[in-house]
Image (cartoon, helix red, strand yellow):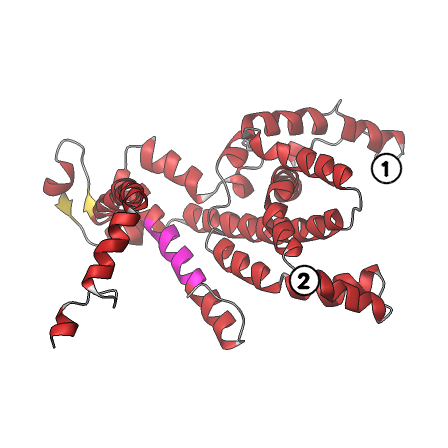
Amino acid sequence: MAQQNKKTLLGMPKDEFIKQVKRQWVLIVWSLFFFAYGIIFCYAPLIGWLMGFQQYKPKDGILHSKWIGLAKFKALFSDATYIRVIRNTLAMGVINLVATTIMAILFAILLNEIKGMRKKKVVQTISYLPHFLSWIIVTGILHDALSGAGIVNELLTKFHLVSQPVNFFAHEKYFWPIVAFANVWKETGWNAIIYLAAITAIDPALYEAASIDGAGRWDKIRYVTIPGIKSTIIILLIMNVGNVLNAGFEIQYLLGNGLVQKVSQTIDIYVLKWGISQMDYSLGTAAGIFKSAVSIVLILICNEVAKRHGEERLF
């Protein structure tokens, strides 16, 4: 009993625990800063979710605003515009997820096949530079490239693929592919970094054994590289599925116009338009709560599916 009383919750003797704290006090102090940051900026603002269940008025504040329960959620799902916004957000989120994931994996594999280290570093550096560009710059480049006098229309007319320039931003059918292309171009190099790191962690002896068995480059990729990064792919996929409804705000807001409004508006734009511009903060909060709830559910479902199939999972 005396020995049990001297043990801490971590299961180690009290003297050993005190010794470890003294040795690592700097790390503990820094950890407390990050812990406080998470509490203050990530969890404390969740108190604002109460506005989604109130008829919130700034002059009354959260504590004194009228409680209305699920009325704002009912108003959301009875609004045909919001249902269309959910469709747009989900569609663009899924397209972006599939396109960026596949392209990042393919690019990492191809980059790994480059033999010269200097060439590999140059290509990798160039590929992830677009990640640091703001969406203002990216959408400006897209506008110039896809305009009537842009390079895309010049090539299409030069090769007689179209008889006259195409107004890409006036047709709804082009909007989602443009958004997907922009995300792929901007994020492929950056997303490929973690896959490339996973590839470099694969035991070189596996490639040597494959070479002895007569495997070519494609066979090595198929039977060594892809299985070697499978767990990384699954973990990142589970995490990114939770961001499906975070399909974006900047690019849709900047590229969208009245002609493509039916397919360009996302939940974030809806919140800006109806929650902030119209000062209906309760409606905007309800929309945000719905998006967060769906993200959590998607992560739980994907994690459970991975667990049932014996794959890597988050928890």
Q: Is residue 80 left or right of residue 43?
A: right
Badge 2 vs badge 1, beta-carbon distance below 8 Å:
no
Residue under pointer 2: 203
- Foreground pick, 279 / 178: 178
Q: Nearer the viewer, residue 306 or 294?
A: 306
Magenta stretch prevailing secondary structure: helix
Q: What are the residue bounds of the magenta stretch?
A: 289-299
Q: Locate residue 25, reporting x and y percent.
A: 27, 45
Write the residue at 52% across / 67% down.
Answer: 312
The residue that appears at 31% across and 45% down in the rendered structure is 31
Q: Amino acid at mark 1?
A: Leu
- The answer to whether residue 135 is seen in the rendering is yes
Please state, as top left, top right, bottom left or bottom right, where the N terminus lies in the image.
bottom left
Q: Where, by quadrant of the figure, is residue 42 drawn? A: top left
| Three-letter residue code for mark 2 | Asp
Q: Position of residue 127 (x, y in %)?
A: 68, 37
Circle 1 sits on which residue?
A: 161
